[in-house]
């Protein structure tokens, strides 16, 4: 028999090999108990060709006009020759019907729901969908193009476990890729899933259901891979409800090793955990470290299902800020001089940070700098990332304040109230008009602190210069100095000498003894006369006179107080 063009308007059951009817509209045809050695060509769009029992077809050609057509086959049907697909079609039915066929795909799209062992793609833009899409890609002739799979591979029934318990019902699907979406449906046709989950890094998705029947039943599970459409549904049965074991009670949380993490303790390798109802992760030791969390997250811990024993109920632990390891201290904070005197400027920061000087409450940072922070060179500034509702404050960066980071003050004006008067002790002066914020020096020596409102008994000479200034205070430098020049009148004179009188050599005179050449004398009043030796002889006096003796003034010191010696008649040469 030669090649036949099948294009019937109604369903027909053909039990012979004689096919001579032709037309151009869509058809639905079932062929049984037939041997078509010449093959078939489908030209109409949206046609359905069903190869029934005991039917063998050598070649099938889908014309480019037959878009949307379907080819199905039963278990005893066979396609033994070439299948050429020139239009988008769907191939389904029994998995063994097309084992021996050589399939050539020239169309831009094909949906395959049965395995095809020998396939060649001649169109580099072909996309492939259907439950057997990946298997077809794997078996494709590598001399042709490799199609792009558009539909996701369905999960295998052996990868699906249904836990029907008295508390939380779950479906666990293994063998997926990280991020795959798993959906569970109550029926084969429902459009709304009763549970959705995402595969974790271990390829396992834990889907929490809204509730199963107490008795056994059937569920339908799909997988959606990244960038692909949802897969066909895999049917799985589940048994009657089982009672979940009690939740563990020993689990606890502490800070993790890494920043932003917590550590789960009080567990063992029979348990598993999840964060915020995600996929359960196995626990392989007595703790699970470095779990990335935020404050308020809920970690659920349960004993893993084992054979017919379902997973236990879960112990739930709410993460507190104290359970999370703080982030490392920032390292970008630096100091430079502030804009105003006595301040520093904090730079290299941002509005996620806060700072404090020495101790106390941290202050928020609203920009990339904080200017005009009042400090001294003994202060320390601490900078950290501020706590949020989800994360604790970071560790703090410690920045010691150095004098170079502080804007200097302008030198204050000199004080104006300083004055000099005679001191309490001989040869000294007294500095007045001062206070305990000041200091002084004599002739540019080291400055000495002032502890009261005056400084007494300063050893000086006439012409010495006493400088008085306000002492430096923290970042405030010492003021300019008020300068006071010491005059003789500002110095307390020395004590009077202790000379004596005896009779002079000539009549009517006395002699002054116990003196030296630093002294001078006067009888009663008038100008003092210098003394050039250790005595002064023949001083004309009467018994009513008084002789005054003192140490003569110098350029540096004033004259001493005067010794008054009354002349007695006994001291006069008769």
Image (tube, rainbow, N blue to C red):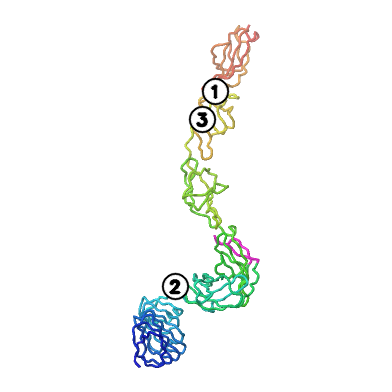
Secondary element under disc 2, as helix, strand or loop, is loop
| Between 169 and 376, the one nearer to me in the picture | 169
| Residue 72 placement: quadrant | bottom left
Give yes or no for residue 256 being in the magenta stretch: yes
| Disc number placed over residue 228 in the picture, else none | 2
How packed is label 1: few (under 14 Cα within 10 Å), some, or many (20 or more)?
A: many
| Between 119 and 17, the one nearer to me in the picture | 17
| Between 462 and 220, the one nearer to me in the picture | 220
- Mark 3 and mark 2 in contact? Answer it, CB < 8 Å: no
How packed is label 3: few (under 14 Cα within 10 Å), some, or many (20 or more)?
A: some
Q: Tell us which disc is closer to us: 3 or 1.
A: 3
Query: Earlier along the polypeptide chain: callout 3 or callout 2?
Result: 2
| Disc number placed over residue 415 in the picture, else none | 3
- Mark 1 and mark 2 in contact? Answer it, CB < 8 Å: no
Query: Earlier along the polypeptide chain: callout 1 or callout 2?
Result: 2
Q: Tell us which disc is closer to us: 1 or 2.
A: 2
| Residue 172 placement: quadrant | bottom right
Span of residues in magenta: 249-266
Q: Which residue is mark 1?
A: 490
Q: Quadrant of the C terminus?
A: top right
Q: Is residue 415 left or right of residue 39?
A: right
Q: Residue 491, position in %: x, y?
A: 56, 23
Q: Residue 519, position in %: x, y?
A: 56, 18
């Amino acid at each position: 028999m030669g090649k036949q063009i099948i294009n019937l308007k109604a369903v027909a059951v053909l039990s012979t090999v004689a096919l001579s009817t032709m037309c151009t509209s869509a058809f639905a045809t079932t062929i049984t108990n037939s041997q078509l050695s010449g093959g078939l060509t489908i030209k109409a769009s949206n046609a359905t060709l069903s190869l029934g029992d005991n039917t063998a077809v050598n070649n099938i050609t889908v014309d480019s006009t037959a878009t949307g057509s379907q080819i199905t086959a039963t278990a005893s049907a066979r396609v033994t020759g070439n299948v050429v697909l020139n239009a988008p079609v769907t191939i389904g039915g029994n998995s063994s019907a097309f084992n021996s066929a050589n399939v050539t795909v020239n169309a831009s799209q094909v949906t395959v729901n049965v395995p095809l062992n020998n396939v060649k793609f001649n169109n580099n833009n072909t996309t492939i969908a259907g439950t057997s899409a990946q298997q077809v890609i794997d078996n494709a002739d590598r001399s042709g193009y490799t199609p792009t799979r558009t539909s996701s591979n369905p999960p295998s029934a052996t990868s699906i476990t249904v836990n029907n318990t008295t508390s939380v019902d779950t479906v666990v699907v293994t063998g997926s890729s990280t991020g795959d979406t798993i959906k569970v449906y109550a029926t084969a046709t429902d459009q709304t899933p009763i549970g959705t989950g995402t595969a974790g890094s271990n390829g396992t998705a834990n889907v929490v259901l809204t509730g199963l029947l107490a008795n056994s039943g059937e569920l339908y599970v799909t997988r959606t891979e990244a960038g692909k459409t949802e897969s066909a549904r895999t049917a799985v049965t589940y048994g009657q409800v089982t009672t979940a074991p009690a939740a563990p009670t020993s689990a606890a949380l502490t800070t993790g090793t890494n920043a932003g993490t917590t550590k789960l303790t009080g567990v063992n390798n029979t348990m598993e955990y999840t964060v915020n109802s995600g996929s359960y992760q196995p626990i392989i030791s007595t703790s699970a470290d470095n779990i990335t969390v935020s404050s308020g997250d809920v970690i659920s811990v349960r004993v893993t299902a084992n054979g017919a024993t379902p997973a236990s109920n879960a112990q739930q632990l709410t993460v507190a800020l104290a359970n999370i390891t703080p982030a490392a201290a920032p390292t970008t904070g630096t100091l430079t001089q502030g804009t105003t005197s006595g301040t520093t400027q904090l730079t290299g920061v941002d509005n996620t940070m806060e700072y404090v000087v020495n101790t106390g409450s941290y202050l928020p940072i609203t920009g990339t700098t904080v200017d005009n922070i009042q400090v001294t060179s003994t202060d320390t500034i601490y900078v950290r990332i501020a706590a949020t509702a989800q994360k604790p404050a970071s560790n703090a960066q410690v920045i010691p304040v150095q004098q170079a980071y502080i804007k200097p003050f302008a030198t204050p004006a000199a004080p104006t109230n300083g004055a000099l008067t005679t001191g309490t002790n001989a040869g000294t002066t007294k500095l007045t008009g001062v206070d305990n914020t000041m200091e002084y020096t004599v002739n540019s020596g080291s400055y000495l602190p002032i502890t009261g409102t005056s400084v007494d008994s300063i050893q000086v000479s006439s012409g010495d210069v006493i400088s008085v200034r306000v002492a430096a205070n923290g970042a405030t430098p010492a003021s300019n100095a008020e300068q006071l020049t010491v005059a003789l009148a500002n110095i307390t004179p020395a004590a009077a000498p202790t000379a004596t009188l005896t009779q002079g050599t000539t009549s009517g005179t006395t002699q002054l003894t116990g003196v030296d050449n630093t002294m001078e004398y006067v009888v009663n009043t008038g100008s003092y006369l210098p003394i050039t030796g250790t005595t002064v002889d023949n001083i004309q006096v009467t018994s009513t006179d008084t002789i005054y003796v003192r140490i003569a003034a110098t350029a540096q010191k004033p004259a001493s107080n005067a010794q008054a010696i009354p002349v007695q008649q006994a001291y006069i040469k008769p």
